[in-house]
Amino acid sequence: MTDPMDAAGLDLEFPFTGRWLVQNSPADRVPSHGTTMFATSFSIDFVPVDDSGHSAAFTLGSLFRSEPPENFTGFGRPVIAPTDGTVMTVNDSEPDHPAYRGLPSLGYALTQRRRAAAGWRALAGNHVMIRSPGGIVALCHLQRASAQIRPGQVVRIGQEIGLCGNSGNSTEPHLHVQAIDGPDIERASARRISFRGSLPSNGSIITV
């Protein structure tokens, strides 16, 4: 496989509509998530937000307790195909777990090593992988039982593929996007990605 730092890029459409906050962008650092494990060097996260730029109201309880994912504005928001291609993988059976902010997020972080040791599926949760002419695009942390497509199906840009959820390695409902150069996530190299010719930076809000 090629060195991920030299990998060619793949330009995508945004896999959503509405307002989404950018987090863990490779525009700000590489590897974007602090690790090269599972070819995540150039991955990016999008958090659905409301008109005020918040994913959910932050209360005193948010500091001390986990929260139902249904409390978040983006839980159940449609996720759409960012590229034309053929569906390679659909995982749709993982539960959506509570969201963790404040002190609960620290406790959740301590369990991340265990999830990583369990492999890609434990981290990605419910996900779809689409094989496009330029590489394989993975969209992760989808809502359980929300998949609208099946393996082998041809999809087009803008087609709904599922709903934003809180499955896998996720502290609140969001969408993780990455691209790889081969079907075996254990051996694949990361592909650089952009959206409509550019790469948004951390903290920016995308409105589509």
Image (cartoon, rainbow, N blue to C red):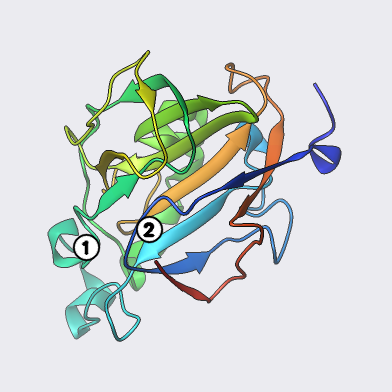
Q: Quadrant of residue 150?
A: top left
Q: Quadrant of the N terminus?
A: top right
Amino acid type at circle 1 is Ser
197, 125: nearer the viewer: 197
Q: Is residue 177 visible?
A: yes
Relative to residue 19, is residue 42 drawn left or right?
A: right
What's the mark number on residue 55? Answer: none
Q: Which residue is the site of mark 2? A: 107
85, 1: nearer the viewer: 85
163, 41: nearer the viewer: 163
Secondary element at tag 2 = helix
Question: How far apart are the alpha carbons under marks 2 and 1?
Answer: 10 Å
Residue drawn at point x = 70 percent, y = 67 percent: 28
Amino acid type at circle 2 is Gly
Tell me if residue 140 comes above or below residue 67 in the rendering: above
Q: Is residue 164 visible?
A: no
Residue drawn at point x = 52 percent, y = 65 percent: 23
> Alpha-carbon neighbours of circle 2 within 10 Å: few (<14), some, or many (≥20)?
few
Q: Nearer the viewer, mark 2 or mark 1?
A: 1
Q: Position of residue 95 (x, y in %)?
A: 20, 36
Q: Position of residue 68 (x, y in %)?
A: 15, 59
Relative to residue 129, is residue 180 drawn left or right?
A: right
Q: Mark 2 or mark 1, which has the lower sequence index?
A: 1
What's the mark number on residue 66? Answer: 1
Q: Position of residue 114 (x, y in %)?
A: 46, 36
Secondary element at tag 1 = loop
